[in-house]
């Protein structure tokens, strides 16, 4: 968890530097046909990077809380955990708005992941009596989701130094998401099936 928090903090600092000094932070993009526009640099490498940092922080903290509070679910509704959901929601909406202003539908699409994360997190957090296994499936979601956001924030953004056009490639963004969702669904179902099988054998 500490590594993920440090990674997300680094991403947030990179995004902040980009928002304040877009050209100085990305001098290799000055002659690019698309990214010579400072607003585009701020949008893709600033606002969207900041959103991905918020997503990584949210999922890392949430995933740890699912384990730590598995026997005391009410603690998941503490002020810091609820504040984390609000921060991610604001970052997601801002990313969508910035994408709308720039005409970048990719940014708008990426923001839906954050909004869906907030919705599913709150669905679990605000339940009064979740089952004893839901914390584990939620932890899996957060664990894999953190990996997706870290990959997106660093591998995808790092690739643009070689080929800046990749920053606007839907495939580069959709591939890790598709793989991650597949892993989440697979492991959640595998864990649920194993628990049900164990309970069935125990009854017999």
Image: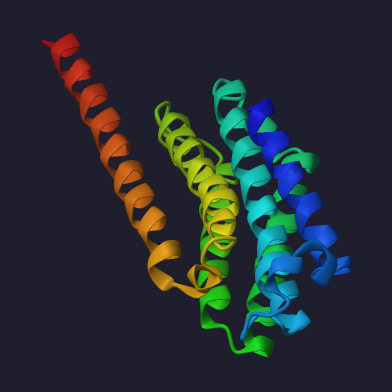
| Residue shown at 68% from the left, 39% from the top | 7
Measured as percent of width and height from the top left, residue 191 is found at: 29, 28
Q: Is residue 36 above or below residue 117?
A: below
Q: In the figure, residue 79 lies in which quadrant? A: top right
Give percent across and percent down for residue 122: 59, 51
Vertical position of residue 48 compared to residue 56: above or below:
below
Spot occupied by residue 163 in the image (x, y as percentages of width and height): 51, 66
In this rendering, the answer to whether 25 lies above or below 138 is below
Please give left or right for residue 97 compared with residue 38 in the image: left
How many labels were placed on the picture?
A: 0
Question: In which quadrant of the rendered view does residue 81 lie?
Answer: top right
Tell me: 177 left or right of 66.
left
Evaluate whether residue 74 shows in this view: no
Position of the N terminus, as image quadrant, is top right
Q: Nearer the viewer, residue 126 or 15?
A: 15
Query: Which residue extends farthest left?
Result: 204
Q: Name the foreground residue: 69 vs 55.
A: 55
- Quarter of the image that includes the C terminus: top left
Between 61 and 49, the one nearer to me in the picture: 49
Q: Is residue 27 left or right of residue 48?
A: right
Taking the image as drawn, is residue 35 in sight?
A: yes
**Residue at the spot 51% in from the left edge and 35% down from the top edge:** 129
> Looking at the image, which residue is at 26% across and 38% down?
189
Residue 6 percent location from the top left of the image: 72, 34
């Amino acid at each position: 968890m500490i590594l993920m928090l440090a990674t997300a903090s680094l991403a947030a600092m990179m995004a902040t530097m980009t928002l304040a000094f877009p050209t100085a932070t990305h001098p290799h993009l000055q002659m690019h046909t698309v990214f010579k526009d400072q607003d585009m640099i701020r949008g893709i490498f600033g606002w969207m990077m900041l959103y991905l940092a918020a997503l990584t922080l949210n999922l890392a903290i949430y995933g740890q809380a699912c384990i730590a509070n598995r026997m005391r679910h009410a603690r998941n509704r503490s002020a810091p955990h609820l504040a984390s959901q609000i921060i991610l929601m604001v970052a997601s909406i801002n990313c969508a708005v910035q994408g709308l202003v720039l005409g970048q539908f990719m940014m708008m699409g990426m923001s839906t992941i954050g909004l869906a994360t907030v919705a599913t997190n709150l669905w679990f957090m605000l339940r009064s009596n979740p089952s004893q296994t839901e914390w584990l499936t939620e932890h899996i979601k957060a664990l894999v989701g953190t990996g997706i956001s870290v990959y997106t924030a660093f591998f995808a953004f790092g690739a643009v130094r070689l080929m800046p056009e990749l920053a606007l490639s839907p495939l580069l963004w959709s591939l890790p998401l598709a793989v991650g969702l597949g892993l989440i669904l697979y492991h959640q179902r595998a864990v649920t099936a194993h628990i049900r099988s164990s309970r069935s054998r125990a009854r017999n």
